[in-house]
Image: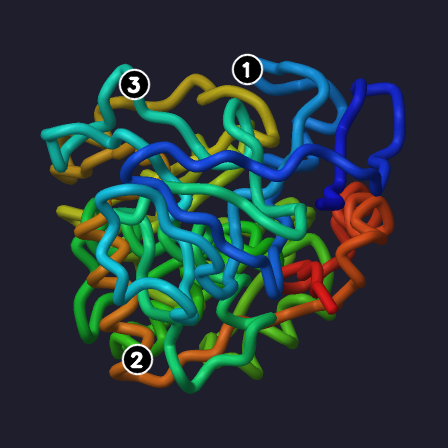
Amino acid sequence: MKAIVLEAPDKPLVWKEVEKPTLTPGEVLVKIKAAALNRRDYWITIGKYAGLKYPTILGSDGAGIVAEIGEGVDGAWLNKEVVIYPGNNWGEHEEFQSKNFKILGLPDDGTFAEYVKTRAEYLYNKPAYLSWEKAAAFPLAGLTAYRALFTKGKAKRGDTVLISGVGGGTCTFALQWAVAAGCKVFVTSGTGEKIDTAIQLGATAGVNYKSKDWAEELYHLAGGFDVIIDSALGAGFAKFPDICNPGARIVFFGGTAGDIPAINGRKIFWKQLQVLGTTMGTQTDFKNMLNFMTEHKIEPVIDEVFPLNEAQKAVDVMDSSSQFGKLVLKAW
């Protein structure tokens, strides 16, 4: 089969012939119809991710058709249209992942290939209302956003929610989930164009985080937040307690802007705030997300679709952070 292979962090991705995966008991082989990029893939390509190995086939998100099944797998899966849960070995605790938890696409070869293997237990029926491209777009980013907003953030109808740094895949899903759940949603972004797009998707308003008084502007617009979703950390994180309502939850799942800065902890305990970290999500979260999507007929936002063999072009777009929504790779 052919696949997109990362041979070293200083080399571009290459489309080349590789050995087709061999199945062991309990595994399935999925013929990929579409895959999608995540920020994780970008960090791996530049050598800034834990557990790097080369060569490797990237890709955590994928949708396709079950082409082969291993020993012990229910034959009903054969030829089914599926999406893949991108985690592996979450473990017995819903609250946190096990030491053996890993994500498809490193260390195991991922979805940027004609075929990918995974365990049958990680297969879910593709939502019938979604195209292949949209079905491939949501697994990792949508799951991360769902767990952050609902499992950890406990967002509910009527809550006022802030999505910090909208435009990337995960925060765009957080926006879509919150709007569908009946929350009043505000956003921040570094560009007016992304704020305008967020408003078209249902946000009430947004401010540019490059503005000196962005937190004050948000507080004036919203009057305080019940849930804040963040993926950046950095200096701006220190202002979140100021704009929280009593009892609010601040949930974060990334640190692209740096570390947690010095914070006035008195506001956290006096307002009874919760600061919560989260990563990916459980299969329970994944099932709940699929049900939520289907109930509300939510369609992932796709910025651009590339042929699978042109994955490097998609990585270059992600490097510029110009996209709004997901970057998708389509097989033919």
Nearer the camera: disc 3 or disc 1 = 3
Quadrant (top left/top right/bottom left/bottom right) for the N terminus: top right
On screen, residue 199 above or below 11? below
Q: Which residue is at 45% across, 22% downward?
A: 260
Q: In terms of secondary structure, where does tag 3 sit?
A: loop
Residue 6 found in image quarter: top right
**Tag 1 residue:** 50
Which of disc 1 and disc 3 is earlier in sequence? 1
In this rendering, position of residue 130 left or right of residue 112: left
Q: Which mark is residue 14?
A: none
Residues 69 and 303: in front is 69
51 with respect to 56 (left or right): left
Graded by Cα atoms within 10 Å as few (under 14), some (14 to 19) or many (20 or more), the crowding at tag 1 reads few
Q: At label 2, which amino acid type do we have? A: Thr
Mark 2 secondary-structure assignment: helix
| Mark linked to residue 294 | 2
**How far is mark 3 from mark 1, CA to CA?**
14 Å
Q: Position of residue 289 (x, y in %)?
A: 28, 63
Q: CA distance from mark 3 to mark 2?
A: 31 Å
Under circle 1, the secondary element is loop
**Vertical comparison of 225 with 244: above or below:** below
Res. 100 mark: 3
Amino acid at dot 1: Ala
* Kind of residue indicated by mark 3: Asn
- The answer to whether any part of residue 29 appears in the image is yes
Question: Label 1, label 2: how many angstroms apart (C-alpha)?
Answer: 34 Å
Closer to the chain start, of discs 1 and 2, is 1
> Is residue 160 in sight in this rendering?
no
